[in-house]
């Protein structure tokens, strides 16, 4: 229990803190940072330098470890959750949830906030009974238990997964005034598993083999064909995500990871890999996940999620906090490799400035960027534009529509525009350029 003496000691500590802070505020750099963050002097918050109220939670010990065998976020963060749109699919089993990109920091998506896409809900799989079969054009068909796969040399890599349909609802105009719904079918994790090429070498690929089929153990039996070059390059058979076993909704106990490729090809609950000489033309590569062009022809097997970026602060859910200096932040990613640069415009794309890439810049991973902005309360049109290591530049919506027309719903990687109102509110708008 604390007594008056402790309170006084706390007050002493505070006065030292305030004193030190004032010295810092006198220097140019930190003075600037305080203004940027909207920091206030202690007096402005009703604090005298000789006393600090001891809050209720400092009066007695809190609950112990026995109440939390698996940790949960603070109850004050209960709005940091996945969200879904009830009307988007005919049933809740076949549905999608969106990651709250507006609430996240760094590049890793916590497992409980990783977006979901199910075609038949989440199966409850007993890992002891689950098997992965490799067969088809191989010398020796193989069957693996999960614990057998864990005996292979493993790798851990950070990669994003984005649904090919991320942004699809924005194709015909600005629809959702929320970053979570315009871009939230996007997440990034550290994945641990076995390179698929190790397993294929065990099986021995027969001459003439060109494609693989990956099939899930969900009730949809979701299946996708993919070329053998990807299997031999960076494809992984994954059993862990951000240090713990895969979550059921992410494919527990095994999923395929095809880094940088459209989400649906990263087959979850993986149970079968068949090697063949041509694609299988499954439902999810013919009836859906194709891109209808103005000519009436549809592009098929468009796997790569091309370079894209979005400003995550400010955004509709994160309005401007007031005038003055502000760090504009966002995320950029490319299924073709590393992000090389991100440009930010404050006037709808007429002028561009280079943003700073923050932290890790990894192959086919989310990359965070930031740029300082001194907002004086005027209307502004904020945009970001990603450039990846291949030199590919994220297109405008006009450029995308010139090639794809209006009927192509997947692979919308257009530049996003946020309209900043003088009130600080942020609105999702589209510029027809
Ligand atoms: Co595609």
Image: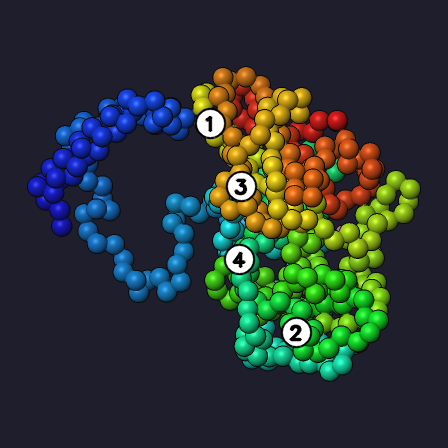
Task: Determine the image quadrant of residue 40.
Answer: top left
Mark 1 or mark 2: whose residue is earlier in sequence: 2
Foreground disc of the pair 2, 3: 2
N-term mark: 3 or 4: 4
Q: Does label 3 or label 1 sit earlier along the sequence?
A: 1
Q: Position of residue 393 (x, y in %)?
A: 70, 37
**Residue occupying the point 55% across, 58% down:** 157
**In what element is the residue under mark 1?**
strand
Q: Where is residue 402, by image quadrant?
A: top right
Position of 347 relative to 113 (above/below): above
Q: Seen in the image, is 229 located left or right of residue 162?
A: right
Dot 1 and dot 2 residues touching (CB under 8 Å): no
> How far separated are the C-alphas under marks 2 and 3?
34 Å
Q: Earlier in the sequence, mark 1 or mark 4?
A: 4
Mark 3–mark 4 contact, CB under 8 Å?
Answer: no
Relative to 42, residue 340 above or below: below
Residue located 84% across and 46% down the image:
292
Q: Is residue 375 left or right of residue 85?
A: left
Residue depicted at 40% across the width and 62% down the height: 70
Please state the horizontal and vertical placement of residue 358, each as a whole percent of the image.
50, 40
Residue receiving disc 2: 199
**Residue position marked by numbered label 3 in the rendering:** 368
The residue identified by callout 4 is 190
Whether residue 358 is visible: yes
Q: Is residue 24 rendered to the left or right of residue 238?
A: left
Residue under numbered circle 1? 326
């Amino acid at each position: 229990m604390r007594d008056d003496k402790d309170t006084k000691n706390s007050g002493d500590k505070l006065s030292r803190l305030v004193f030190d802070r004032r010295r810092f505020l006198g220097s140019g750099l930190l003075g600037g940072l305080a203004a940027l963050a909207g920091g206030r002097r202690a007096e402005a918050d009703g604090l005298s330098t000789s006393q600090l109220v001891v809050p209720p939670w400092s009066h007695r010990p809190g609950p112990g470890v026995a109440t939390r065998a698996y940790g949960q976020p603070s109850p004050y963060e209960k709005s940091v959750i996945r969200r879904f749109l009830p009307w988007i699919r005919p049933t809740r089993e076949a549905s999608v949830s969106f990651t709250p990109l507006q609430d996240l920091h760094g590049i890793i998506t916590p497992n409980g906030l990783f977006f979901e896409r199910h075609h038949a809900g989440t199966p409850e799989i007993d890992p002891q009974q689950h098997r992965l079969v490799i067969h088809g054009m191989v010398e020796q068909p193989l069957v693996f238990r999960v614990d057998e796969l864990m005996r292979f040399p493993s790798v851990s890599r950070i990669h994003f997964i984005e649904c090919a349909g991320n942004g699809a609802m924005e194709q015909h105009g600005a629809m959702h005034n929320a970053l979570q719904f315009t871009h939230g079918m996007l997440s990034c994790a550290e994945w641990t598993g076995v390179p698929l090429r190790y397993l294929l070498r065990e099986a021995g690929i027969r001459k003439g083999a060109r494609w693989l089929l990956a099939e899930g153990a969900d009730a949809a039996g979701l299946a996708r064909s993919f070329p053998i070059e990807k299997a031999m390059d960076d494809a992984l058979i994954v059993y862990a995500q951000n240090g713990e076993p895969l979550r059921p909704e992410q494919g527990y106990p095994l999923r395929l990871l095809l880094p940088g490729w459209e989400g649906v090809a990263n087959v979850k609950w993986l149970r079968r890999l068949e090697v063949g000489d041509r694609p299988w033309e499954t439902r999810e590569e013919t009836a859906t996940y194709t891109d209808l062009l103005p000519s009436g022809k549809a592009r098929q097997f468009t796997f790569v999620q091309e370079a894209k970026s979005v400003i995550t602060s400010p955004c509709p859910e994160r309005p401007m906090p007031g005038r003055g200096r502000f760090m504009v932040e966002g995320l950029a990613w490319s299924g073709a490799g590393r992000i090389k640069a991100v440009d930010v415009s404050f006037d709808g794309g007429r002028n561009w400035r280079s943003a700073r890439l923050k932290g890790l810049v990894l192959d086919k991973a989310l990359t965070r960027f930031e740029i300082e902005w001194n907002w004086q309360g005027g209307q502004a049109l904020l945009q970001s534009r990603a450039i990846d290591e291949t030199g590919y530049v994220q297109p405008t919506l006009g450029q995308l529509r010139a090639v794809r027309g209006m009927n192509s719903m997947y692979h919308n990687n257009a530049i996003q525009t946020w309209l900043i109102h003088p009130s600080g509110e942020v609105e999702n708008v589209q510029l027809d350029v």
